[in-house]
Amino acid sequence: MNADERREARRRAARRRIEPDAAPAGETALRSKPVRITVDLAPELYRRLTRWTTEVAEEIDAAKVTTADIVRAYIRACDDPEVRARVVAELRELKQ
């Protein structure tokens, strides 16, 4: 799909949203592309993160564990109520 086709598809979708009983914006399709995030870390926190990724790589016998791997694992780990509670407690302390 070229740029003009994408632009026209967006226009058609926008026109459909004003029709009676139209689905709210953002609920008509699922995002299929990954979402990129950027995080600024203090140097000491970054050193701790890179040190930890190296230790984990050795622990699981992998050549390398990336920071992106770590973030994904942390997000999944927060499905565990105990992990989530610890993260929430840490955030609460940081925000006070």
Image (spheres, rainbow, N blue to C red):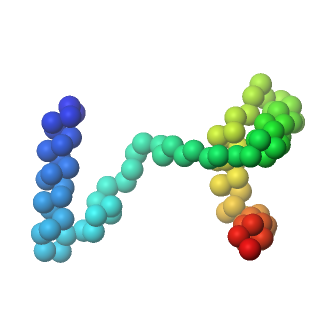
Question: Where is the C terminus found, in terms of image quarters?
Answer: bottom right
> Across the whole image, how many numbered discs are drawn on residues?
0
Answer with left or right where residue 94 lies relative to residue 37.
Answer: right
Residue 3 image point, x, y percent? 20, 34
Residue 67 image point, x, y percent? 69, 39
- Residue beneath the point at 81% across and 39% down: 47
Residue 85 image point, x, y percent? 75, 70
Residue 72 image point, x, y percent? 64, 47
- Residue beneath the point at 48% across and 46% down: 35
- Residue beneath the point at 77% across and 25% down: 63
In this view, which residue lies farthest toward the top? 63
Q: Is residue 25 visible?
A: yes
Dividing the picture into quadrants, the one containing residue 88 is bottom right
Dividing the picture into quadrants, the one containing residue 27 is bottom left
Answer with left or right where residue 57 lies relative to residue 12.
Answer: right
Who is closer to the viewer here, 91 or 84? 91
- Residue beneath the point at 18% across and 58% down: 14
- Above or below, 85 against 10 in this view is below
Answer with left or right where residue 17 lies relative to residue 51.
Answer: left
Q: Is residue 88 visible?
A: no
Question: Where is the N terminus found, in terms of image quarters?
Answer: top left
